[in-house]
Amino acid sequence: MSNGTFEPRLVGFLCNWCSYTGADLAGTARMIYAPNVRIIRVMCSGRVDPQFVLKAFKEGADGVLISGCHPGDCHYKEGNYKALRRYKLLLKMLDQFGIEKERFRLEWVSAAEGVKFQHVCNEFTEQVRKLGPLYLSKNGGKHEQREA
Amino acid sequence: MAEMAKEKAYRIHLMVCAGTGCVSNNAFGIKAALEREVKKQGLENEVLIVTTGCNGFCERGPLLVVQPGSIFYQQLTEKDIPHLVEEHFLKGRPVKKLMYTPPKEKTPVPVLSDIDFFKKQVLIALRNRGLIDPEKIDEYIARDGYKAVAKALTEMAPEQVITEIANSGLRGRGGAGFPTGLKWQMVRNAPASNGSLKYLICNGDEGDPGAFMDRSILEADPHSVIEGMVIGARAVGASEGFVYVRNEYPLAIKRMNIAIEQARDYGLLGNNILGTGFDFDIKIVRGAGAFVCGEETALIASVEGRLGEPRTRPPYPAQSGLWEKPTLINNVETWANVPIIIDRGAKWYASIGTLTSKGTKVFSLVGKINNTGLVEVPMGIALREIIYDIGGGIPGGKEFKAVQTGGPSGGCIPKEQLDLPIDYESLTAAGSMMGSGGMVVMDEDTCMVDVARYFLTFTKDESCGKCTPCREGTKAMLDIITRITEGKGTEEDLTLLEDMAHAVKDSSLCGLGKTAPNPVLTTLRYFRNEYEAHIRDRKCPAHVCRQLNVYTIDENRCLTVGKGCDLCRRNCASDAIRGAKNEAHRIVQEKCIKCGVCYDVCNFGAVKVD
Amino acid sequence: MVNLTIDGKKVQIEEGKTILQAAAKCEIKIPTLCYHPVVEAYGACRVCMVEVTVRGKTDLVTACNTKVQEGLDVQTGSERVLKARRLNVEMLMARAPAAEPVQELAKALGIEKTRFEIKDPQEKCILCGLCVRACETIVGASAISFIERGTERKVMPPFGEPSEACIGCTACAYFCPTGAITYEDKYGRKVIHTELHLGPTTAIRVPIRQAVPMVPLIDTEACIHFKTGECKVCTKVCDREAINHDMQDETLEVEVGTIILASGFKPFDAKRIPAYGYGHFPNVITALEFERLVNASGPTGGKIKLADGTEPKAVGIIHCVGSRDENYNEYCSRVCCMYSLKFAHLIKEKTSADVYDFYIDMRCFGKGYEEFYHRLLHEGTKFIRGRVSDITDMAMTQREEGKLIIRVEDTLLGTVRRIPVDMVILATGLEPSIDHNQLAKIFNISCSQDTFFLERHPKLAPVSTFSDGIYLAGACQAPRDIPDTVAQAGGAAAEALALADKGTFALEPVTAEIDEDLCAGCQLCVNLCPFTAITYDKEKGISVVNDALCKGCGTCVAACPSGASHQKHFRDSQIFAEIEGIFVV
Amino acid sequence: MPKLTLDDLAKIREKTKRLTTIRVGGEYRAKVCVHMGTCGIAAGARTIMNALMKELEEREIHDVLLTNSGCAGLCSREPMATVEVAGQAPVKYVDLTEKKIKEIFEKHVLGGKIVQEYALGIGSEKTDY
């Protein structure tokens, strides 16, 4: 915001066992990556309820990221498969709300893939930055105030 | 029932001998001639022609015995038949010309029983020879056949049968002379392992060269063997029997098959024999031409389809024989004696023969003897009686030298032992053995070293090759003896030969190896001088070993008597004779290969050999 | 028990035993040729004849298959026995002049020369029939038998043609006392340096001396019993009757509370670096193969030999094969430096060869390791710092003729050097064991980037994994040498025992619960739960969560249409609040 | 072929024995010898022999020995036959015809009484060998 470029505000739901640990690894390995993604820890990517995604967009998120274990690595066996299904369905709904598909993203990051998490954050941030802010609802107004 | 049923009586029965000997001498041709002539004379309703087994007097084959009156005709030819039929059968005048005239006499001896050859014989195993048609069971029954089976199966318990055989003193006629009763007892007592299966075997391998006793029994009287086996089976509780016959005896096999078939038809063989519930059947197994398969364990291996080679005993076949079941093995002649013992009782049988060797023994009398043939003599008879009284002495006025008994496993008995009584113990004491009964008579023209060589060649070829002493020993001994007959023998050879003989006898596995040295040992024992002659003076007293003969020509006889006929020179293969027509001939010793052709060819006795 | 006397010595032995066995019992030697303890006695050679008197009757019998009798008096060396034995042996000398056992027996009996005709001076077969009997009774193939009779007797397959019944087990050659039967491997499969098996062995064998447990195993491909159903010679010889051919592999179901995974490592496959010529040059071997070669109980008894059996004059040891390498494994396998130093030391000790050691960094991290390295420096091992590029046998100079040339960039000298050696040892690195990924799936644990198992936390929980109750020990978690592995194993065991000792098991605080009032009984969550922790209660018509089974993943909570399912500590309201918190500016 | 019982066996034995006694020279009740020299045959000895054979067959007699011999010397009185009942002297009959021989067979051979009118003489020639 400070230098006049649009800094998207992104929300990332990270599963506790793989992605959250991966992020932690990126941190302990002192890797530099875009801070735009604000992380919410859930026990498993399967826990991410579509409502959370919609709530996030409603609250003014410019993009939502869900990140879980690689298929087969899930600590709860099948949680990430459920997340994948919901992601596919949710993508179809977002169109109807006028939210571009690129604003919503699902990524597999294992506990060892600190580097991958770094790339995902940077890429996603750039991607949403290109899309620009999402003036979704009345909160969007608050958004203008922010803009101004 | 036989076609005799129509009660057709004949007034003359022609007993044509159809043993293998006579058959090979055109006996069937004689029979056809007889049938033709009898039909021509219209006597077919009065004269019955019967083919019988071997009559025994093989020297004089083909034979015919006319009954009634048992007129004995011999050395018949087809062209004698028309005259014989007309003269004797039509006109009732026996033909003297065809009768048997003893060598030194003039007048023929018409009646069979008056002929010396038959007079001293006592027929037990050969009781039916020449009297029945072996291919008609009724005729065997008529001769009290199957009476003993009836008695054994209905009136006697198995144990009783065994004690009867034991009391009779019958011993194995195969050669070893093992007491038959004891053997039957052992087989009976042998615990029948899984299932009560026990086997019976009739050993008809008869591998000895020159022995044809078993063949004659099987051809002349197969039912006696079958009846004996049924009794034996009943006694020891066997359910299956095998008759192991040499493949070289086709006629014996044919007649045995017919007899078995007829016995089965009459219910005397197979299931429920004579309605007594006792089952016993017999199969024929043909030998594959190996002398060693005469030995019981090799025979068993051969019947089982395995390689015919003996195995170490014990266990004896009585405990574990055919397919590891208790098996009773006896020789053909032993089986043939059984029915008559049961029929007439042990006491009667024990009255014949000596203290330790009971009953009679059939010998095939061959070699340098006038009356070659099959003789059955009581045990204890002296050798002299067999050779001179029965055998009719040595032909050609030659001197008797020795007799070889027991075939290749037997030994030679010299002139000095002529009064040796014939029984198991005395023959073994003399270094020979009873053996199956081969008796080869030898005269002065026989070289004893050559006899030993002949029998060794036989055992070397027939050795199964399993154990070292017999396989290598017989060959080694043969090499030594052959060297001696070629005049290359040394003194050491003699001692080595003797050592070898003892070593082979001691360490061979089976009977073949243990007895193969007997011919060598006995010829060494009684005729050592001949061996020494061959070695020291390079001479063969009997002129049999050709390499040692020296052929010379009596020059003046050749010139004066033969007038230099030059026949010898022309026939000499190695061109060793010098001389021309009307000149005395001479032999060049270096070139002479001692083939003896000149000696044989010269008609004037000019060629001398020493 | 039967009592008998042999050569005057009294001996007692069980019923049914043979004279030979009785003689052996009282150490009396009776010569035999056609006898073998596991094959049925045949009595063909007659060399074991002894003189026997029982109940007054004396006779010569074969000792190998004549059973003992009560009161038997046996003479093994009587004059009659020796005479027969000497002549039998002399005959065999003529039959088989080239047979050693016969010559030895002849010397023992004092026979110089045979007086009989020798047919074939090269003949070795003494017709003892051991091969025929072994093939028939032991192997059960009956492929060969005797043919012909008397002196013509020979051992042959039917009609002299190769027999289909023959299974090529070479039992006949094994049993042949005189070496008359030989065999050769048509396809030259003599194995020297692959998979540690170094050379053909018997069907029943102790794999290597240090095997734990040190118990023989039966190789069912090679064992004749599994081919023809016969043989079982091993059971005959093993007096403990410890061998049972009918044993089958069985899987055991064991209920355990905790599991320690110690699946170990697999050496890096040196063939993956073609430049080093492993598999192409016979004298390029891997570290484990060299370990086997230098092992005292190994095939060469610890002697260091080249493939052709000679002693190497120069040996090269190459470190970091397949480790610290972008193309293969980036991680350092940690143990190679130290065992390479051990090899260098062993080579110096056992041979007079020069040792060249090619390293990148000498990692002597352990206690006393550095001192060992200095010792090696003094022993004269030549250390060259640099990564070896390739190994070739194309000699450029006379000196390199017939040698393996190691081309290396010596970073300390700054030049590329060519070192001719006879043998090259590749210090191959460590990789996770062969069924590593499968194990990870079974135990539901994940792997770290270097493909070893992932520990729960590198510093705080190095031995445990994300799955409770499953622990890690040894090289499966990371390359590690023996002292470290032992220490870590101790730790893992302690962890496991601690868990087991507690007796109670702390449940997950984070579990789902279903609000009875909201639940419509649609049972959607019942099939959803991967741990079948939710069951449908028919009376109440609602689904119920079983706390012990629920792992707290929350999948059912997200899927519940009526919002009846809640996840403690991660209730919707809490997450909504978090989301709102993000955007409070 | 039915399986034999013991008495079947005995029956066969008896029957065959009768037919083969000729071979073993069993004891005979009587012996009839027809003289069939060349002249005898010419005088009809064959018919006498056939007649005798038929008699034996019909009456199933097996213990009478019927043989023939060469010419008995008295050619003028051919055909001739000698009948010798066991234990009695042989009797020669001459000028035989079929009818006569049947009568002789019945009366003398079976009945044991000599038929005087046909008989030539009693006793037999002495032979020196």
Image (tube, helix red, strand yellow):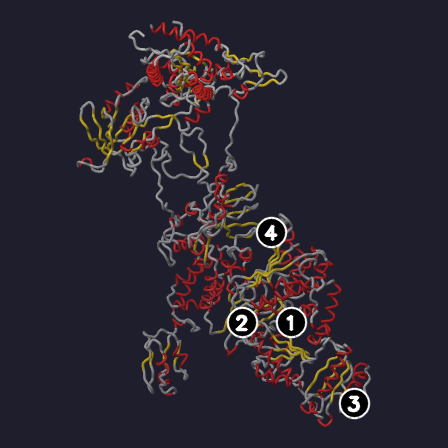
Amino acid type, label 3: Ala
Residue to which mark 3 is pinned: D119
Please give the residue where the numbered disc 4 appears in the rendered image.
Answer: B325
Pointer 2: what residue? B366
Tell me the chain of label 2.
Answer: B
Tell me the mark number nearer the camera, choosing from 2 and 3.
3
Quarter holding the C terminus of chain B is: bottom left
Q: Amino acid at mark 4?
A: Lys
Mark 1 = which residue? B133
Counting residues from the start of the chain, the first of labels 2 and 4 encountered is: 4
Instruction: Pick the residue in front: C95 or B421.
Output: C95
Dot 2 alpha-carbon crowd within 10 angstroms: few under 14, some 14 to 19, many 20 or more: many
- Among the two numbered marks 2 and 1 on one chain, the one whose residue lies closer to the N terminus: 1
Q: Chain of mark 4?
A: B
Q: Report the Cα–Cα distance between label 4 and label 1.
A: 36 Å
For the residues beneath circles 2 and 3, the answer to whether they share a chain is: no
Q: Is residue B96 above or below residue C10?
A: below
Q: Chain of mark 3?
A: D
On the same chain: label 2 and label 1? yes
Nearer mark to the viewer, of 4 and 1: 1
* Mark 3 Cα-neighbour bin, 10 Å: few <14, some 14–19, many ≥20: some
